[in-house]
Structures are given as C-alpha cells and as structure tokens.
Image (tube, rainbow, N blue to C red):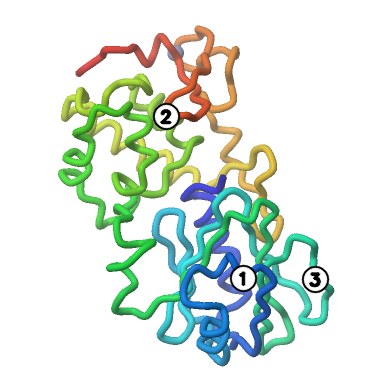
Amino acid sequence: MPELPEVETVRRSLFPLIKNRTIENVIVYFPRMIKEPDVETFKRRVRGQTFKAIERLGKHLLFKVGDLTMIVHLRMEGKFMIKAIDAPKDKHEHLRFNLSDGQALCYYDVRKFGTLHLKEANTLYTTKPLRHVAHEPISEAFDFNAFAEKLKSDRPVKAAILDQKVISGIGNIYADEILFCASIHPDTPARELSRARIKKLAECAKTILNKAVESGGTTIRTYKNALGVDGMFQLHLNVHMREGEACKKCGRTLKKKKTAGRGTYFCPTCQKKGRKT
Ligand SMILES: [Zn+2]
C-alpha cells in the first residue's frame, strides 16, 4: 500500500506532466470510484478546468483543478499513468482525463479500492475524507502536544500510529520502521509511553519519512509508483519483511507477529515489552 513517501513520489513525478493542462473530457469507466458528487456532476464540473497544482495530505493526493480540489486516495494499488489520448483502454483503467496537449491522465487500480472526492475550497478540510486527517510528522504544522494527547488510549501503539486521525501518512511498512527506530514494542499500550518516548517516536517518524521521501519511497511486492518509478527505500528497511534475519542493531533474530491485525516485524531485544521510559 502506498504510504506518505510513495504518494509524495507520485505527486512529484506526476505534476510536471499535467501542469497547466486543461481537462477537455473525462471518461469514467468505474463510477463507484467517484464518491462525491454524482458522476455526471463530477464530469460537468471538471471539464474545462486546468491542473494548477498537486498537493498532498498524508496519503491523499489533492489535485487543484481551477478552484476545485479532486482528492484521490490510491488505497492498495491505485496508480496514475500518462497515455496518448487515443490509446486503447487498459483492463484496469477506471478513469481518464483527456488533456489539452493530446495526452491523457489515466487512473488504474487492479483492486478497485481507490476513491475520488471533488470539493469546493470552503469544505475541503471540514468534510470527509480530510476532516479528521491529522498533520503528518514531516509537516511544519505538526503539533507534538496534540499528537501526545491523541496517543492516550489503551490500544497498541502500532494501531495508534496507523490511525490517520492520530498522525497521518504512516502505513504498515513505516510503522514497523518507526517503532524499531524508537525502540518501542509494537504491542505497548499507547497511553503507557513516557513523554520522552513519544518525543523519540515523533522524531523517528520525521526522520524515516523524510529519508523515504528522498529515496522515492519503498518498492516491495506489487506496488509500483505511477510512471513506473521505483523507490529505493527498501534498501534501508531495518525490520519490515526481515523476519528471521539478524537485527542491524543487536544481531539477534527479528520476529514477526500480528498487531492491530497487521503483520508486524520487530526486534524482541531492541523493542522490549513493558519499557516505559
Ligand atoms: Zn535488535
């Protein structure tokens, strides 16, 4: 699943290819992807609009088209491609924007989980899906006290940092890496973390996500970024997908378990259970 660094890579690689292009026509092959408004209204409203910017919040891409914003969440395997306007439809293509330069911006999604919402500026951050999305750790707007406050729950810290309302942009891969960096056992009840440990957690989140953004994200399993760009952060993974291998800090064997319903990789020595300081 693309997390913040992969979505940021999509944003950076895609924008130069659609910047200032006008949408001449929209073809929706999979209407269920358009969550808001209804498909006909969506098509009517974006036709004739120009791509002004692509912003991002957590794992959401925010396409600025005229005064409107298209919020796209790629979920498991969504991706964008640029094709010639007359190229045949791909089997997994759900959406196509024909652009003024003879190219088409196409959205593909084998799993069909991706979503699109079209919003006016005044409701962009006050309605779903962005309404409760927390700031991301690499944002200047990130508020440490608000983050610490939201961690006050009995659920495992791994579940808490996967919750986009607590901190945004982190998915399964980076959650494992961040908890290893902060020497926190993934099952630790979030409310048991000391303030110093939460500080370390926020610092690790920032460092790791920044480094992953620089590396173009992580390429594992089936996910590839838009335009076939592969990230290289998998070379820096310390625990994720490394079950049975040696811990890079202590040399002991890394383990895998289920936490918050997700496969979780950790070092039982470096991330001791019950550690509170
Ligand atoms: Zn270790």
Q: Residues within 10 Å of mark 3 (few under 14, many from 20)?
A: few
In the image: residue 131, left or right of residue 64:
left
**Quick one: label 1, few (<14), some, or many (20+) residues within 10 Å?**
few
Q: Is mark 2 within 8 Å of ligand 1?
A: no
Disc assigned to residue 17: none
Residue 241, image quadrant: top right
User: Tag on residue 89?
Assistant: 3
Q: Residue at x 51, y 35 (%)?
A: 173
Which quarter is ligand 1 in?
Answer: top left
Earlier in the chain: of badge 1 and badge 2, it is 1
Q: Secondary structure at mark 2?
A: loop
The residue lying at 63 percent from left, 74 percent from top is 17
Q: Which mark is residue 31?
A: 1
Q: Residues within 10 Å of mark 2 (few under 14, many from 20)?
A: some
Q: Position of residue 263 (x, y in %)?
A: 52, 26
In the drawing, does residue 140 fall left or right of residue 105?
left
Instruction: Note whether 131 is above or below 66 in the view shown.
Output: above
Some atom of ligand 1 lies within 8 Å of the CB belonging to the residue at label 1? no
- What amino acid type is highlighted by mark number 2? Ala
Q: Nearer the viewer, residue 162 or 18?
A: 162
Mark 1 lies on a secondary structure that is: helix
Q: Which label sits on residue 260? A: 2
CA–CA distance between discs 2 and 3? 38 Å
Residue type at numbered disc 1: Pro
Is the residue 262 above or below the residue 74 in the image? above
Is 31 drawn above or below residue 172 in the view shown?
A: below
